[in-house]
């Protein structure tokens, strides 16, 4: 049971770190992120 808990928390930690590091460019409004959202994903500029 303890082994499963350790594996669970390691996976959750890696997933959380991935989510945080991919959200940083969007939170900082970097031009590359804005171009990706508006040009590649075809969202309007007011969503950014």
Image (cartoon, rainbow, N blue to C red):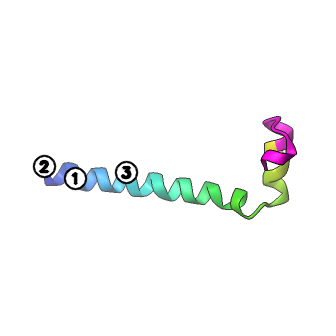
Can you identify the residue that label 2 sits on?
Answer: 1
Residue 43 falls within the magenta-colored stretch: yes
Residue 15 falls within the magenta-colored stretch: no
Can you identify the residue that label 3 sits on?
Answer: 11
In-front residue for pair 7/20:
20
What segment carries the magenta color?
38-48
Q: Earlier in the sequence, mark 3 or mark 1?
A: 1
Can you identify the residue that label 1 sits on?
Answer: 5
Residue 37 percent coordinates (x, y): 79, 44
- Which residue reaches farthest front? 46
- Secondary structure under tag 1 reads helix
How far, Cα to Cα, is label 1 from label 2?
6 Å
- Secondary structure under tag 3 reads helix
Q: Is residue 12 left or right of residue 25?
A: left
Badge 3: few (under 14), some or many (20 or more) residues near its Cα, within 10 Å? Answer: few
How far, Cα to Cα, is label 2 from label 3?
16 Å
What is the count of numbered marks?
3
- Which residue reaches farthest top? 42
Q: Residue at x 34, y 56 (%)?
A: 10
């Amino acid at each position: 049971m303890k082994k499963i808990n350790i594996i669970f928390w390691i996976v959750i930690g890696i997933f959380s770190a991935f989510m945080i590091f991919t959200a940083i460019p969007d939170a900082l409004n970097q031009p590359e992120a804005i171009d990706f959202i508006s040009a590649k994903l075809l969202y309007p500029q007011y969503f950014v």
